[in-house]
Amino acid sequence: MGQISITHFSDPGCPWAYSASPALAVLRWRYGAQLDWRMVTIGLSEDPQRYVERGYTPTRMTVGNLGFRRYGMPFGAEPRARVAATARACRAIVATGLLDPGREHDALRALQFGWFTTTLVLDEDADIATALERAGGLDVAAIVAAIDDERTIERYEADKALTRTAAGSPTDFQGKARQTDGPVRYSAPSLVFESDGRRLEAGGFQGIEAYDVLIANLDPTLAREAPPESPLQALERFPGGLVTQEVAAIMTHNNQLPDRPAAERALVELVGSGVATRTSLGDDALWQLA
């Protein structure tokens, strides 16, 4: 059985990265441990003043985020107290990887939920800790304490430097790279697939079709799991929970359009039978095994 390595460039404060969650959930369902993920944090902003000087306010950012609801992820509609930078949240993800390797994705996801469905100000350590508690099983106190550790900062700066090497890449060619603080960088989310010396890029926001065709060309010997018959199987695979659009995407055959209403009806039935729970999250919900 082959394996493909994926370098995942992301940032917890990017709504495009958050909106790609259903497609990433499909990849994890479909290919499982055959994909070896590496998280690289982008560090979109070190200081919120950069956004303030460009005219951003908490209200403007919240209104802008509402436009991303069309991709299916939950969003809140209450502005936070002030604009926040993303660097400390990125370093919390890096610290998670150093202290608890393999949990970086869980930290990213918890911080994304905090960023887009709550009013937490996620460049403040207390609010970062509150968001990370959602992940479950993390030593949140140790992670937050390590945000300013030399080792964390060194790894974070290495992530930032790698992110800013996109000039001339396929991502740049496709118009998916960005240049916001000097060098041309990968945007969030950018996925770089590598196998047997070959490298393919899916830069910026892409649909599941783009990811799937790259995997098919890199290694057609992989086992490709069919969609589950019931949302229950998806919830069993993802104990941290899934939102409605993620469940609908996982249950979709052959990259067709997800049937969200059907997925939600099936999820409600699971809750009614006592085998699943529903926790309100922004304008949607997080579904988990009871």
Image (cartoon, rainbow, N blue to C red):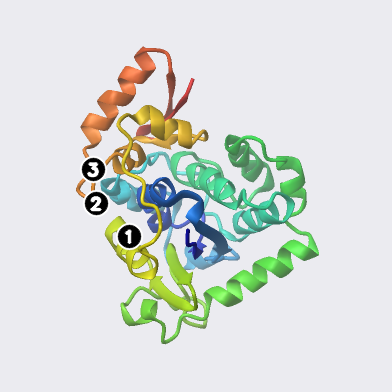
Question: Can residue 281 be seen from the camera position used here?
Answer: no
Q: Secondary structure at mark 2?
A: loop
Q: Position of residue 189 (x, y in %)?
A: 43, 62
281 versus 171 height, above or below: above
131 versus 11 height, above or below: above
Q: Position of residue 164 (x, y in %)?
A: 53, 78
Q: Secondary structure at mark 3?
A: loop
Q: Looking at the rendered structure, which numbered label has been put on residue 212?
A: 1
Q: Mark 1 or mark 2, which is nearer the start of the sequence?
A: 1
Q: Amino acid at mark 2?
A: Asn
Counting other residues with Cα less than 10 Å from the Cα at mark 2, is it few (<14), some (14-19), or many (20 or more)? some
Report, in whole angstroms, how far the alpha carbon at label 1 lies from the one at label 3: 16 Å
- 223 to the left or right of 163: left
Tell me the residue that label 3 is attached to: 258
- 148 to the left or right of 38: right
Question: Can residue 57 be seen from the camera position used here?
Answer: yes
Q: Amino acid at mark 1?
A: Asp
> Given contact means CB atoms under 8 Å apart, are the residues at marks 2 and 1 in contact?
yes
Tell me the residue that label 2 is attached to: 255
